[in-house]
Image (cartoon, grey):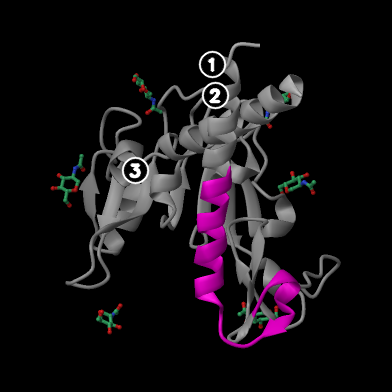
Amino acid sequence: MKAVGSQLKHRVLVLIISFCFNTSHQLTEQQVCELCSGTVLNDTAVGRLCSTSAGRIDRRCCLKSDNKSDPERIIGLDLSNCSLTDVKDLSGASTALMIDLSLNPLVNISDAIFQGFVELNYLILPQDLLCLGGNTSWEKVEVKDGNRICKGQINMCNQTGQLSVTCPENSLCGRYGPGFFGCSCADNYHGYKCLREGEFPSLNVFASLGAATVVLTFLLWITQRRKVKPL
Ligand SMILES: *[C@@H]1O[C@H](CO)[C@@H](O)[C@H](O)[C@H]1NC(C)=O
Ligand SMILES: *[C@@H]1O[C@H](CO)[C@@H](O)[C@H](O)[C@H]1NC(C)=O
Ligand SMILES: *[C@@H]1O[C@H](CO)[C@@H](O)[C@H](O)[C@H]1NC(C)=O
Ligand SMILES: *[C@@H]1O[C@H](CO)[C@@H](O)[C@H](O)[C@H]1NC(C)=O
Ligand SMILES: *[C@@H]1O[C@H](CO)[C@@H](O)[C@H](O)[C@H]1NC(C)=O
Ligand SMILES: *[C@@H]1O[C@H](CO)[C@@H](O)[C@H](O)[C@H]1NC(C)=O
């Protein structure tokens, strides 16, 4: 009985810790631009993108706002020659059109880093790294001057070739970064595989979230209490 209790408590703690770890690990826009000293240089790919699209250079980023009222977003990120041995998180730059990771001693990077980078259309990597998501995720892959250039992200939802992406009925396929896609329920559908039709039951969802919190609290209370009680 005690073993079950402490096991449960252990699981709950692991859950909470991994949640905290995940959220604190995301880099903001500013942190991504400061990953390395120096600024974007004029005669680099990101520098040229920035001058042709009338962006503003801030350290290693090119920022631009599409609209006077919209905040600026990162359109280019230049982390070339930054002595990076590992890249774990670039989430602050998920709006980027171009990312340069050339001239870094990178061995491999995980595909997951670029999840959600739907606008990324030009990625420069050290030659030894492969384009994320594989060649089939890009329109063109080029090896030039010691760099591998991945150009034109392919929309996985629009593949007529060997890789046919199928979302369940009543759902829409959306791109989600190189090699990734996501399925979201079409209007008026919800639930597992979008099988249920009708208004989204927001009240029920909040209610069950509330119930889950109550259960968690109760579990923690029970396991704590067990310790205090003399056996
Ligand atoms: C970079 O571009 C800016 C603006 O066009 C210019 O003022 C500056 O002299 C350029 N710097 C170099 C090193 O070319
Ligand atoms: C600019 O913002 C307005 C209001 O938010 C929006 O209606 C318009 O489509 C935006 N224009 C562009 C070019 O994004
Ligand atoms: C990379 O950076 C080092 C010093 O930080 C510099 O000496 C070298 O010229 C740079 N290389 C390139 C290709 O910019
Ligand atoms: C990097 O490569 C090593 C060995 O090839 C492998 O064990 C490791 O899982 C890789 N890491 C990632 C993030 O892909
Ligand atoms: C991907 O493309 C590059 C450059 O065209 C090529 O060297 C490489 O062999 C390709 N990889 C695969 C798995 O097709
Ligand atoms: C889907 O692919 C076809 C043929 O490759 C292309 O003509 C069309 O523009 C693509 N549509 C989208 C939304 O990318």
For label 2, being within 8 Å of ligand 4 is answered no
Q: Quadrant of the N terminus?
A: top right
Q: Quadrant of the C terminus?
A: top right
Kindly identify which residue carries mark 1: 228
Q: Name the residue at 81% across, 70% down.
A: 164
Task: Name the kind of residue labelled 2 in the image.
Answer: Gln
Corner quadrant of residue 69: bottom left
Q: Quadrant of ligand 3?
A: top left
Q: Residue at x 44, y 46 (%)?
A: 91
How many numbered markers are drawn?
3
For mark 2, give the secondary structure: helix
Q: Is residue 63 left or right of residue 98?
A: left
The disc at residue 84 is none
Range drawn in magenta: 190-215
Which residue bears the numbered disc 3?
28
How crowded is the residue under tag 3: few (<14 C-alpha within 10 Å), some, or many (20+)?
some
Q: Secondary structure at mark 1?
A: helix
Nearer to us of marks 1 and 2 is 1
Tell me the distance, in whole angstroms, between the alpha carbons under discs 1 and 2: 7 Å
- Residue at numbered disc 2: 224
Q: Picture coordinates of residue 39 (x, y %)? A: 26, 36
> Relative to 128, does residue 170 appear above or below in the rendering?
below
In the displayed structure, does residue 3 sit left or right of residue 13? Answer: right
Asked whether disc 1 touches disc 2, contact meaning CB atoms under 8 Å apart, the reply is yes
Is the residue marked by circle 2 packed among few (<14), some (14-19), or many (20+) residues within 10 Å? some
Identity, as a three-letter code, of the amino acid under mark 3: Thr
**Residue 138, x across and y down, in percent:** 65, 58
